[in-house]
Image (cartoon, rainbow, N blue to C red):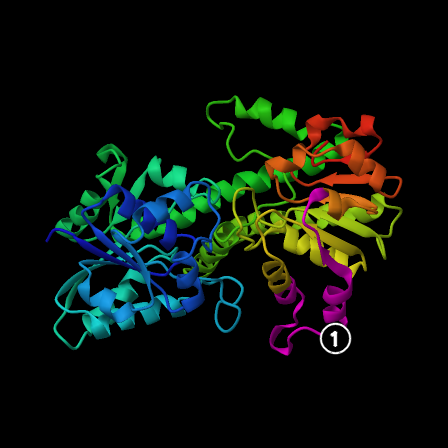
Amino acid sequence: MSVSKICCIGAGYVGGPTMAMIAHKCPNIDVKVVDINETRIAQWNSDTLPIYEPGLDEIVKGCRGKNLTFTTEIDAAIKEADMIFISVNTPTKTFGVGAGRAANLEYVEKCARRIAEVAEGHKIVVEKSTLPVRTAEAVKRILSNASNGSTFDVLSNPEFLAEGTAIEDLLDPDRVLIGGERKEAIQELVDVYAHWVPTDRILTTNLWSSELSKLTANAFLAQRVSSINAISALCEATEADVDEVAAAIGTDSRIGPKFLKASVGFGGSCFQKDILNLVYLCEYFGLPEVAQYWEQVVRMNDYQKERFVSRMVRTMFNTVSDKKIAIWGFAFKKDTNDTRESAAIYVVRDLLLEKARVCIYDPQVTKQQVIQELEYVLSEGDNGISPAKRELIDNHVTFASSCEEASSDAHAIAVLTEWDEFAEVDFGKIYDSMKKPAFVFDGRNRLKQKNLVDSGFEYHGIGF
């Protein structure tokens, strides 16, 4: 079988960009991205895509209407496809067994059952979502019970995209990992990626190794962030400079410089979710010491966010009540509009609980996204959000269309995303518009080289 038609179930941060790149590099393959969310599909078909990613807009618009289609007609796309990617959300469970750690596989199972119900002939089904080890076994069991005689191969093809550089990562990946059992099925997916990825970067493994490699890669990267953040606390206590420490150890070829940037904490859809999933797996298989080891990476990340807010309160005369705080950035990193697990969510939450008034500016994140994140993080389980916390959002959260507007009449600025534009504003003008003393708390050390102290600010970065 030569793959000529691909269906991807899930039009999110992974499915959309990945399928756009396949369509871009494989003009002979017809690619359909399907989703039950009609609003999201309409956005993919509009001039304003639902995802902000540098370079994505041009690729989508270059292929859309040719060999790239976004549609809600799921069953038809499944029937026509030779290869079906499952790229749906796998959030951490918030209920039942494994709550707070295990991945919620509800959407993956529903996809598998939908495929089994409507597929015709032979299909190659590819796990693209981040999944716990041996999920493929469950998918295979569901597909094997298809009542219409259809047959399936199941492959694991985890994504290793970094938001903000997803198009670069797709164009020139460090590696493409494909796990499977039947060589012929694996080769079909290898042949798709080989249109533009050198074959020495396409790694093939068994299913289980592929699934575990994704969780392990993210756990190792998050471990480095938490490690340097732990050292940042020690640097502040000893008057060392964490950036100098990171530069020194980063020159060691055994360590290297990547992911040694101290900050207010890591965020995004993968790091915390994947580590907690790894913790759950270790507990499930009777490895409590291993589980505790990896759980500490998440605990350190939480501690860094708590420490940032505590430092703000302590520095601002032990109270931020009724003080305006300008929040610069709400996305979890620059060059994306993704707010999932953003450090800003928890910093803003804790500032609101201290009765601060926050004014938020982010160049790509919408007001609706911010409100939804705050409602979720301030909710009290099934009881929803209390009237008192609803009042905090309604009366203590405002939005601005620029850094200058957010900072006007503010007591402090909290830099929570490292957007490039934040280093290019007129700090003299901003200083003049703020309450005095004018504090800057730089959770990304983005403004460290701006000598803001010389401009009159009280500047506080991470790890020095």
Q: Nearer the viewer, residue 257 or 44?
A: 44
Q: Main secondary structure of the magenta part?
A: helix
Which of the 4 image quadrants contains residue 167?
Answer: top left
Q: Residue at x 73, y 59 (%)?
A: 397
Q: Residue at x 56, y 33 (%)?
A: 260
Magenta stretch encompasses residue 186: no
Residue carrying label 1? 387
Residue 289 against residue 242 in the figure, above or below: below
Q: Nearer the viewer, residue 231 or 446?
A: 446
Q: Nearer the viewer, residue 67 or 438?
A: 67
Q: Amino acid at mark 1?
A: Pro
Specify the segment rendered in magenta: 374-403
Residue 381: % across, % down: 62, 73
Residue 272: % across, % down: 52, 53
Which of the 4 image quadrants contains residue 199?
Answer: top left
Determine the secondary structure under disc 1: helix
Q: Is residue 136 left or right of residue 360?
A: left
State whether residue 243 appears in this view: yes
Q: Is residue 6 left or right of residue 436?
A: left
Q: Is residue 370 left or right of residue 316?
A: left
State whether residue 446 appears in this view: no
Residue 385 against residue 371 in the figure, above or below: below
Q: Is residue 382 left or right of residue 62?
A: right
Residue 14 against residue 404 in the figure, above or below: below
Residue 124: % across, % down: 19, 58
